[in-house]
Each structure stands twice: as structure tokens, then as C-alpha cells.
Image (cartoon, rainbow, N blue to C red):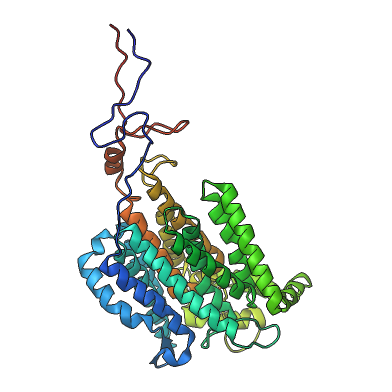
Amino acid sequence: MRAPGNFAVPRPGFPLPGAAPFARPEQKERVSLTGKWMFVFAVMISMSAWEKLRIPIPALNAHPYLIAMLPLFIYLFFTRLGRFPLSVLTTTAIFSTLYILSVFSSTIPYYQEPVKLLAGAGTMITAALAVTSRSDFRAGVVGLTVALVIMALKGLAAPSASYIGVDPLETSNENSWSLYNLPPLLLGGYMTLDKTVSKSLRIFCGTAFVIISISVLASANRSGWLGLAVVPPMLFLGRGKKIQTMLYFVLAAGLVFLVMEQLGMFDVVQHHMEATTEGKTTDGKRIQLLMASLQIGLEHPLLGVSPQELFFMLAHRVFGMDGTIDSHNVFAHVTGGSGYPAMFTLFLSAYLLWKRPSGVPSDFFGNERAASAHYIMKMMILMWGIRGFFSREILYSPVFCMGIGICIGWCVVEGVWKPADEQRSRTAGRQPRPGMRPVPGMRALPRRTR
């Protein structure tokens, strides 16, 4: 008697044929001590909205959360640094070195920039190493969400001048506000749609999504509006149940509209939309600043002209005046200020986080949790690129750095970047889903006859 075709041989510990493929038993996970510590300093980011709570350093007001983060960074650096993806750690170190060398290549003192860059890199590494489970990842997301709800409520409660909009930050302008709220919108929205999250936590994240969205729309920052607009498509494409996801966003949009209508917050939106359509904005100048920065990078390809001198050169070339002007674009800032090698290593870091491991099919990472972790990681990188096109300060934005860090940590926990041989050994013997390519390492018995 002939067997009904080739079939995979399940190995001990893996699901039998007919069982739900890739099923991973759900275990009760608790937030680790480092996860709780990370939650605390994530909430402390909200303190940055008050100028009097900033750490006074000459010519620099540092973020208060760094005090709580520093001991955790030291502990994790000596105990868990080996868990961080080596390739990404290497490119991050090379980029930081090139950037700092470009700063000190100038005769103009500008020590604030290296301090902020190292603080941002330290935040990303600390958040990544603090994550030891999915519960730790969720603790980081909730911490960021709590911090942004506090800041959003502060901005909404304070009276603002006409057409200036909501801006809870006392030490910066409205352009910096969206650097804080976009990562919690993406990550909190993901947790709202995740059925494995407790109902109470999903309700909290959903409510926070509405509050933060209102504060974004009520601000005068158009790049923040763009970031908010791309969040629903990102989450929609990453969820299996499209109808439920669409209904959630329709409900959230309705609540945001009703609240803003009742509070009379649409004047800011209308004013800036009209200014955009009538061409009364600085969009043309932003393009000129970008092109001038790329040209300066070509003239000084190795280390650029230094970030601090770039401000003076842009003011002279684009506006024909003495003084300084910001590039308003992280890619322009790095290319013109630190050179093309620094820009290359920055892109390389993003590519290493984006790409899948060698030898693993595009639709398989060993289990659905790993696939979800890597998808959210890629959406954070994409959000960083979109928002970075309008601001250089995203290089050391505490919320973006921490958001990317906890995504890296979750990917490490789920084994996204395991070596190819180890991935194949983990997946050997598993049954692929219908229409899915065979998993590397899967064996099949030859056909037998009686």
C-alpha cells in the first residue's frame, strides 16, 4: 500500500500533523525587575515637559529620566551587552564615533551634541537589554504611553494662543512635540489591537490613543499630522482581522472628532491646512536646505563640515545672511555635518534591523510572536524615517530611542535574529501553513510500497 505522498516527520516537542502549526504554548509571564525599572524611567520622560524639572547643565537642559536610567545602563552593559545584535551595535558605535569626530573637527565648541547623541544611544541600548520577555516589552510601551498621556493632558489643559496649538514642552517648540507622541501612538495602538493583552490594558491603550491623537491634531505641527496619518495603515497591514482593525480606527476617529468639535480645536487645523494649500509655508525652503546640505556633504565627504558649522553655511547659502539656520532634516544634518560615511552607517543600521535572517523564508520566523515583533520593529524604523525627514533632533529623541530599543529587545527575545543554522534547527520538522514555502531543515520520508 502506498503512502499518500511525502510528509514531514515531526520531531519530539513539535506539533503533530493536523495540529495548529507554529502554535506556541502561552505561559504566564511576569515583568522582570529590569522591566519594572524601565517602566519607571519611561514614565519619568513626562518630566521633560517642565523646564524646572530638567537637569541644569551649562548650555544644556538634560532629561530627568537619565538619572534613573544611568544605573540600569551600567548594570546591563556589564551583564547583558552580548544579547544586543552585534552588527547593529557595531554600526551604532561607528556612526557615533564619526559624528563625534565631526563635531570636534571644528574650532567652534559644541559639546552638547555629543552628550545628547550618547544619551540617545544609551537609551536605545538600555531599553533593548532591559527586555527579557513580551511582558517587559509591554511594560515599556505602557510606560511611554503613561508619560505621553501626562504630557498631552498638560498641553490640552494649558491655554494657547490662536493658531499656535497644543505644545506641552516648555523648553522647545511645537515641532519637537510629535517626536514624543508618535512612538506611543504606534506601539500603544498595536497593544490595543492585540487580543492576547488583557482587556483592561487594551482599554487603557485605546483611551490613551485617542487622547494623544487629539493633542497631535490640536498642535500646529504638520509633520506630526503626517505621522499620525500613517499609524492606522501600519497597524492595519500588520493585523490579520482587517474588519475589526478598521472598526477600531473608525471609532477612534469619531471620538477624536467629537472631542475636538466640542472644545473648538479645529481652528488650528483649518488655519494650517489653508496655509499649506495656499503655499504660505516654508516647504520650498526646506527642500533648498536639503539640497544645500547634500552639496556640502559632497564638498566635504569624509567628516562633513561639522554639525555646528553646517548651521552657519546653510544660513549663508540658502538665505544669504549671517547667523544660523537648522537643516530641519536628519538626513541633511548628518550628510552635510558629518559626511557620507556617517550617513551610510546610519542607513546600514536601519537595514540590519529591517532585514530577515539569512536562510529564513520571508513568511516565517519560527512563530507568530516573532513575526509580530519584527513587523513592529520595521514600522518603528519606517516611522523614524518619515519623521526624521522633518527634524534632526530625532537622532536623540528619548521616546524614539526607547521605542526602537524595546522593539529590538522583543525581537531578541523572540529569536528574530538567530543565526541561520539555529533557525533551521528550531523550525525543523514543523508543518508549513497551506500555500507556504517549505521551511529549511524540514525532512520528508521517501514513498514506501508494501
Residue furthest out toward the left: 79
Q: Quadrant of residue 423?
A: top left
Q: Residue at x 64, y 63 (%)?
A: 253
Q: Residue at x 27, y 74 (%)?
A: 72
| Residue 35 shows up from this direction | yes
Q: Quadrant of residue 269?
A: bottom right
Q: Position of residue 218 (x, y in %)?
A: 64, 76
* Count of numbered tags: 0
Q: Please give left or right for residue 285 compared with residue 335 in the image.
A: right
- Does 150 appear above or below 357? below
Q: Position of residue 42 (x, y in %)?
A: 39, 74
Q: Position of residue 233 (x, y in %)?
A: 59, 55
Q: Which residue is more in the foreground, 147 or 384?
A: 147
Residue furthest out toward the front: 200
- Does 17 appear above or below 388? above
Q: Position of residue 172 (x, y in %)?
A: 53, 85
| Residue 390 shows up from this direction | no
Q: Residue at x 58, y 85 (%)?
A: 157
User: What quarter of the picture does the N terminus occupy?
Assistant: top left
- Does 6 appear above or below 192? above
- Does 341 appear above or below 357? below
User: What quarter of the picture does the C terminus occupy?
Assistant: top left
